[in-house]
């Protein structure tokens, strides 16, 4: 299973764009990159998933360079409610591999007013 | 609300007692996962089911732990003879497997266990 490395914490202010980068040097060909968000005393919440290039949804964008050894989660115009832990995961979603999620320690994002 | 529910939300027990947690996944989801999360750490995989079949158990799941999903719907996780080291948040997630791949896992709110 690919290991991921991401910053332990980041600080930002309301209205700013936040970019959290994750490195996964040993990513395998069939691995996808997935980001989850977790608030205290709640379960993780899916944010976005991608394989290559750029993926965008109503919440965030995910940028993946051609070598796929890193990825960047971009949160536009953050608010105080975006203060949470953000996890970057890589894994093979094919049926036979179980898709067991492997979480690291995540990045604590603190948004200030 | 993801549609995955867990009960109870909190459980306080004394060391040596047995506890059981329940997870109700999203109704059409055929995969169900259990994870454990301790303070300051990310969730760790414990076990997962495909319908009613338990397909994999982590080394973290000692003999005191047992999980079932009898009818392929809800699941229970039982811990026998609890120890203080079992104190953690127990998370359940469900997903749909189709077309040879597994889709996004949706997590419940978790059950926080405190063993005194």
Image (spheres, rainbow, N blue to C red):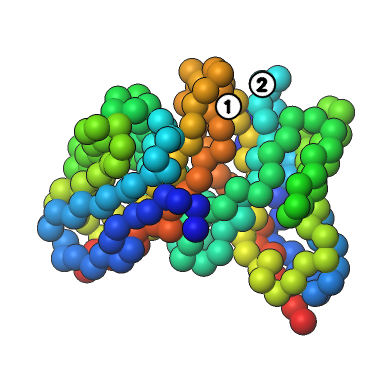
Foreground: B90 or B4? Answer: B4
In the picture, the disc for residue A44 is none
Q: Secondary structure at mark 2?
A: loop
Q: Residue at x 42, y 43 (%)?
A: B26
Instruction: Identify the chain of the residue marked 1, using the numbered disc in the image.
Output: A
Q: Quadrant of the N terminus of chain A?
A: top right
Find the residue positioned furthest to the front: B28
| Residue B7 picture location, percent across and down | 29, 58
Horizontal relation, residue A111 to residue B89: left or right:
right
The residue wearing badge 2 is A30
The reply to whether callout 1 and callout 2 are in contact (CB within 8 Å) is yes
| Residue A101 picture location, percent across and down | 52, 38
Instruction: Identify the chain of the residue marked 2, using the numbered disc in the image.
Output: A
Horizontal relation, residue B98 to residue A48: left or right:
left
Q: Quadrant of residue A37?
A: bottom right
Q: Secondary structure at mark 1?
A: loop
Q: Which of the two labelled residues, at mark 1 and mark 2, occupies the earlier sequence position?
A: 2
Foreground: A109 or B103? Answer: B103
CA gap, disc 1 to disc 2? 8 Å
| Residue A25 picture location, percent across and down | 74, 32
Q: Quadrant of residue A16?
A: bottom right
Q: Residue at x 49, y 58 (%)?
A: B1
Q: Quadrant of the C terminus of chain A?
A: bottom right
Looking at the picture, does residue A76 appear above or below residue A25?
below
Horizontal relation, residue A20 to residue A98: left or right:
right
The residue wearing badge 1 is A93
Q: Quadrant of residue A23?
A: top right
Q: Is residue B81 visible?
A: yes
């Amino acid at each position: 299973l690919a290991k991921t490395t991401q910053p332990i914490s980041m600080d930002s202010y309301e209205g700013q764009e936040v970019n959290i980068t994750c490195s996964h040097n040993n990513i395998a060909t069939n691995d996808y990159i997935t980001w989850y968000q977790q608030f205290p005393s709640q379960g993780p919440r899916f944010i976005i998933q991608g394989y290559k290039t750029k993926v965008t949804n109503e919440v965030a964008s995910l940028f993946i360079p051609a070598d796929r050894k890193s990825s960047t989660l971009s949160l536009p115009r953050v608010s105080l409610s975006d203060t949470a832990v953000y996890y970057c995961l890589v894994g093979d979603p094919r049926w036979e591999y179980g898709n067991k999620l492997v979480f690291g320690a995540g990045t604590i994002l603190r948004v200030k007013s | 609300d993801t549609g995955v529910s867990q009960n109870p939300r909190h459980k306080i027990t004394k060391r040596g007692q047995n506890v059981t947690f329940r997870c109700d996944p999203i109704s059409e989801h055929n995969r169900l996962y259990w994870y454990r999360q301790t303070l300051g750490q990310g969730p760790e995989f414990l076990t997962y089911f495909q319908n009613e079949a338990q397909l994999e158990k982590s080394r973290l799941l000692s003999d005191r732990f047992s999980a079932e999903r009898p009818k392929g719907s809800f699941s229970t996780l039982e811990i026998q003879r609890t120890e203080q080291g079992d104190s953690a948040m127990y998370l359940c997630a469900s997903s749909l497997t189709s077309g040879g791949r597994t889709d996004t896992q949706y997590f419940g709110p978790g059950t926080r266990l405190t063993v005194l």
